[in-house]
Amino acid sequence: MNGRPRVRRRGRAGLAALFAGATVAVVIALAAGRGAADDAGCRSALIPAYLPPEGIARIAARPVRDRVVVFNPDSGPGTVPRAAYRSAVAAEQRAGTRVIGYVHTGWGARDPAAVRADVMRYRSWYGVDGIFFDETAHDAAQLPYYAALAHDTRADGLAVVAFNPGTVPARGYVDLADIVVTFEGPARAYDAALRSMPQWTREVPRRKLAHLLYDATRAQALHAVTEGSAGYVYATSASLPDPWSTLPPYLDELETRLAGCP
């Protein structure tokens, strides 16, 4: 488990089929070209909003430039579409927020067909902008699995591919995805984690990286805005086992600070 909490999910599937190395090389090369894009501008928040529809609508009430929201009806898209979630997603998108759907991958052990089925449900039921692949592996051996997921997700017309290993993975994951969560953990561990991150995390476009903090006081959350090189930062005062099921009281201030950062 890489020593980090599992983000809200239920159930696991069988072993994944891996894909040919040549395909991986092609996908990585294409993704690397995207990574060289302009990295100008201020940072923003990537919010794991594992909330009821009214909670997602509350976020939409305050538009913020470049915000990304992850929504998660039932540890994935669920088994039936829910109109209230569709309305909440549409409200976020009208406010300029990109909304991406939560899909767990079991650290690369979940059947790719089951993962793809979740992706297609999000696309057809909710019109999402992309997918947040949770429980992402961090080792290079699983790159073919995630290269195939990234390729198929974009081929399905979804623009944003986010991986969440919750720690710094092999460099190839950052080449494959649009956003990679390289820290997910308690705020008290954040500064030490930043000091231990490899140099390449400070050299890639910052909009490729996200940091997620929980158990954060207001002071710790605002401190996180000024530290590190991640283009997306989010902190919440909530705790395990499910810190992403509530919004912090300081969310508006955190996002205002992010928008004003150099």
Image: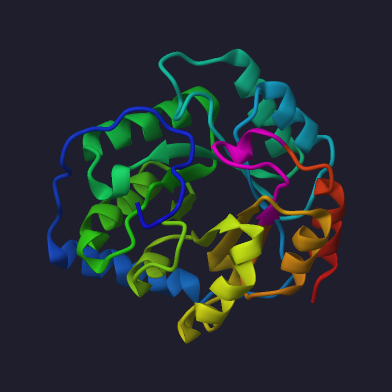
Relative to 107, 92 lies left or right: right
Q: What secondary structure prevails in the magenta region? A: loop
Q: Nearer the viewer, residue 186 or 198?
A: 186
Q: Residue at x 40, y 73 (%)?
A: 32
Q: Residue at x 81, y 71 (%)?
A: 261
Q: Is residue 42 visible?
A: no
Q: Residue 57: x percent and y percent?
A: 75, 29
Q: Residue 183: x percent and y percent?
A: 53, 62
Residue 9 quadrant? top left
Quadrant location of the C terminus in the rendered image = bottom right
Q: Residue 58: x percent and y percent?
A: 79, 31
Q: Is residue 102 above or below residue 155?
A: above
In the rendered structure, which segment of residues is drawn in magenta? 234-246
Q: Nearer the viewer, residue 20 or 258?
A: 258
Q: Is residue 253 above or below residue 198?
A: above
Q: Nearer the viewer, residue 206 or 156?
A: 206
Q: Residue 244: x percent and y percent?
A: 62, 39
Residue 223 quadrant? bottom right
Q: Residue at x 74, y 38 (%)?
A: 247
Chosen colour scheme: rainbow
Residue 90 quadrant? top right
Relative to 147, 223 lies left or right: right
**How many numbered circles does the render carry?**
0
Q: Is residue 115 above or below residue 39?
A: above
Q: Residue furthest front?
A: 188
Q: Is residue 178 visible?
A: yes
